[in-house]
Amino acid sequence: AQSVTQLGSHVSVSEGALVLLRCNYSSSVPPYLFWYVQYPNQGLQLLLKYTSAATLVKGINGFEAEFKKSETSFHLTKPSAHMSDAAEYFCAVRHGSSNTGKLIFGQGTTLQVKP
Amino acid sequence: EAGVAQSPRYKIIEKRQSVAFWCNPISGHATLYWYQQILGQGPKLLIQFQNNGVVDDSQLPKDRFSAERLKGVDSTLKIQPAKLEDSAVYLCASSLEGGLTYEQYFGPGTRLTVT
């Protein structure tokens, strides 16, 4: 069965500091991995995705993530945090076949950015 | 392009009452998903439709939850009767097709409070 684990339910950084949100996955097949962001009272927005091409994936708003098969990790990073990055972040693995593709989400990590 | 629309945005009901949520996916999207997001957790898939057929409803509590997508466009999710543990945000998402490579677009969600 596929699953994801996000390490740390809350992460707090200062504005301008490095953002690192951790995600480890479990999958018996090559995974499709995603990071989503959720702002208060809004739906989920896709930040970036890994679909077995380049292992370093660049997304929107300056975020990127690196797929490391040996560590079964897909950590999300941003070199310099901005106040507007404060939100909840979800790592997800896509499970299914050619015509089904449900997302299996981690528990989420709340990012706080301090001025 | 209009996004995924959901209504109502908020709903408060008493336990044992009934409630219905509505979703209008992005035009032309064949696949529609309903997710349940309990506070402090990641979203969990309840049901996936491909056009007006059910692809996956393995985690739908069928004794109280029902969903339909009669004309392959709009969808309704119903809970009858509601329990306290149904308090959650119900997210609707749609994608062009259901396969692993197709991005899911999320609506803003309906926040349900059961008292």
Image (cartoon, rainbow, N blue to C red):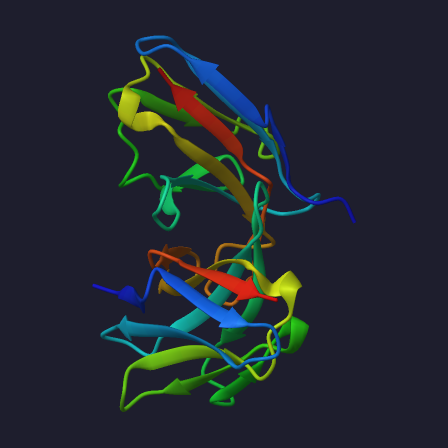
Nearer to the camera, A104 or B102: A104
Residue B35 at x, y percent in the picture = 42, 41
Q: Quadrant of the C terminus of chain A?
A: bottom right
Nearer to the camera, B12 or A94: B12
Residue A90 at x, y percent in the picture = 44, 60
Residue at 48% over, 62% down? A111
- B69 vs B45: above or below: above
Residue A33 at x, y percent in the picture = 42, 71
- B63 vs B39: above or below: above
Kindly tell me whether residue A97 is visible in this rendering. Answer: no
Q: Quadrant of the N terminus of chain A?
A: bottom left
Residue at 39% over, 79% down? A74
Nearer to the camera, B96 or A51: A51
Q: How many marks?
A: 0
- A90 vs B58: above or below: below
Seen in the image, is A97 located left or right of residue B24?
left
Nearer to the camera, B104 or A112: A112
**Which quadrant of the figure has residue A104?**
bottom left
Kindly tell me whether residue B64 is visible in this rendering. Answer: yes
Seen in the image, is B18 located left or right of residue A38?
left
Residue at 52% over, 29% down? B69
Q: Residue furthest right?
A: B1
Residue B51 at x, y percent in the picture = 54, 40
**Which quadrant of the figure has residue B104?**
bottom right
